[in-house]
Amino acid sequence: MRFKDVFSIIGPSMIGPSSSHTAGAVRLGRCARQALGASPEEAVIRFYGSFADTYMGHGTDLAITAGIMNYDTDDARIRDSIRLAAEEGIAISFQSELRPGPHPNTATILLRRGVCTVRMTGCSIGGGNIELVGVNGFDVKFTAIYPTLLIYHRDRSGILAEITDIAKHSGINISYMEVDRKSRNGEALTVIESDQPFKPEAIASLGLLPDVREISIIDLTNREEAR
């Protein structure tokens, strides 16, 4: 990954001790929470590599829980996040995996609320930066540095042109785009990162496209959403 600026290297404003084990973990949790679109009733977090070895000592369990609560990296409540999650009725469990992940600091987060679930795998790659490498069985990679759309749809001819046409007419400048599908003409996921936040009317237009079944918004740049 190419770092965008010096702040990508030194890390964000954060509650320590480590940009990789805490700030990056917070952001992984926030991505999963925002992909679900609501506070979960249950969270299962699996740690790999260095995360699995040191998550309690480095506070990674607190950090990723804080992200699931939608706290930002510098929120003082990070230290009490597990207790606060329990008070909200969120059942959280942690597991350590012996097999290696795609990066030494990798976590898979499974969130459930009612019949809705999100399964997201991501890596904390340094300086508080993250890379998501899997969402709900789709092999997609994105950083969530910019506002991000997850568009679940059926794979068919012309649908990507329709998506990008709406983006064009809505003033969305696509900075990154990736698509994965489970089978030909089967379920697919398109990921779009944009230089600016997505307007509600653009989301509404995308949702009206034939064969689009669900849209999730991840926007770590919006501090107003971090409560």
Image (cartoon, rainbow, N blue to C red):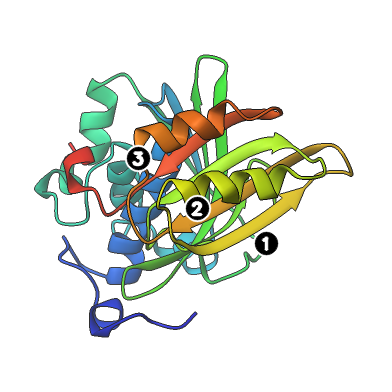
Q: Is residue 187 left or right of residue 101?
A: right
- Asked if residue 104 can be seen in this view, the reply is yes
Label 1, secondary structure: give it: loop
User: Disc 1 vs disc 2: Cβ atoms closer than 8 Å?
Assistant: no
Mark 3 belongs to which amino acid?
Answer: Lys
Query: Upstream in the sequence, badge 3 or badge 2?
Result: 2
- Asked if residue 93 can be seen in this view, the reply is no
Q: Position of residue 40 (x, y in %)?
A: 41, 26
Mark 1 belongs to which amino acid?
Answer: Arg
Q: Position of residue 14 (x, y in %)?
A: 17, 63
Q: Determine which residue is flagged by label 1.
A: 99
Q: Position of residue 117 (x, y in %)?
A: 56, 28
Question: Looking at the rendered structure, which numbered label has been put on residue 168?
Answer: 2
Q: Is residue 64 left or right of residue 177?
A: left
Question: Looking at the rendered structure, which numbered label has been put on residue 199?
Answer: 3
**Front residue of 96 and 151:** 151
Label 3, secondary structure: give it: loop
Name which residue lies at 27% across and 54% down.
221
The quarter of the picture where residue 32 lies is top left
**Camera-side mark, 3 or 2:** 2
Mark 2 belongs to which amino acid?
Answer: Lys
**Camera-side mark, 1 or 3:** 3
